[in-house]
Image (cartoon, rainbow, N blue to C red):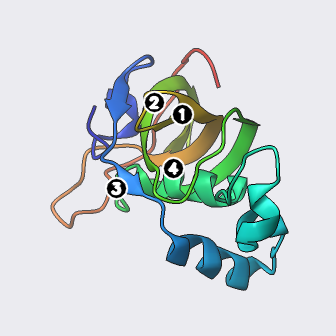
């Protein structure tokens, strides 16, 4: 799947897989500092050693943020993220784990006759290096319609389209 095509050329069910990314201690400490979430499961190795996970783990929201960042969304096509839903954290991501995203287009919906963008729902699975799913989520993005014109801007509205899902 390519992330640079106009909305009307996307196909429901189209699948993709991203590159991987290793989660580091610097990532977890930086996320803790940015968010103020210093829960000992993420920040205290001794405390975490006696926890259910046996060691420190990445914040679930950090993992989800990495997932969105791993998807090569084209800034000329994707106007904005509109919604994150149905997030389920299934397994921990430990420091040193490498994750990637496996996903598909789960829904396409025109937002109106005069709109220059449609809603695209992406179903995501964040997968660890051992092949097990760490997290599942759906994100909804506002996606530009139309082939680019001579000036590089999208050429017009999506028109009256009926798509499944979303």
Q: Residue at x 34, y 48 (%)?
A: 20
Q: Secondary structure at mark 4?
A: helix
Q: Secondary structure at mark 1?
A: strand
The total of numbered circles placed on residues is: 4
Query: Which circle, 1 or 3, is nearer the viewer?
Result: 1
Of pointers 1 and 3, the one earlier in the residue sequence: 3
Which mark is drawn over residue 103? 2
Q: Nearer the viewer, residue 161 or 14?
A: 14
To which residue does mark 4 refer?
Answer: 67
| Residue 40 x/y as whole percent | 82, 69
Asked if marks 1 and 4 touch (Cβ < 8 Å), the reply is yes
Q: Quadrant of residue 52?
A: top right
Is residue 90 at all visible to an observer of this figure?
A: yes
**Spatial CA span between label 1 and label 4:** 8 Å
Q: Nearer the viewer, residue 16 or 47?
A: 47
Q: Residue at x 66, y 56 (%)?
A: 57
| Residue 47 x/y as whole percent | 82, 65
To which residue does mark 1 refer?
Answer: 124
For disc 1, the neighbor class at 10 Å (few under 14, some 14 to 19, many from 20) is many
Q: Secondary structure at mark 3?
A: loop
Is residue 116 at all visible to an observer of this figure?
A: no
């Amino acid at each position: 799947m390519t992330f640079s095509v106009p909305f009307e050329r996307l196909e429901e069910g189209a699948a993709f897989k991203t590159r991987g990314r290793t989660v580091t201690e610097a990532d977890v400490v930086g996320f803790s500092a940015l968010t103020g979430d210093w829960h000992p499961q993420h920040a205290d190795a001794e405390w975490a050693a006696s926890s259910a996970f046996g060691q420190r783990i990445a914040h679930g929201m950090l993992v989800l943020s990495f997932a969105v960042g791993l998807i090569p969304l084209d800034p000329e096509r994707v106007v904005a993220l509109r919604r994150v839903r149905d997030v389920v954290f299934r397994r921990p991501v430990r420091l040193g784990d490498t994750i990637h995203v496996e996903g598909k287009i789960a829904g396409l919906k025109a937002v109106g006759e005069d709109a220059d963008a449609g809603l695209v729902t992406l179903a995501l699975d964040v997968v660890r290096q051992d092949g097990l799913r760490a997290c599942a989520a759906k994100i909804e993005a506002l996606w530009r319609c139309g082939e680019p014109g001579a000036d590089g801007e999208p050429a017009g509205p999506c028109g009256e389209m009926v798509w499944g899902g979303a």
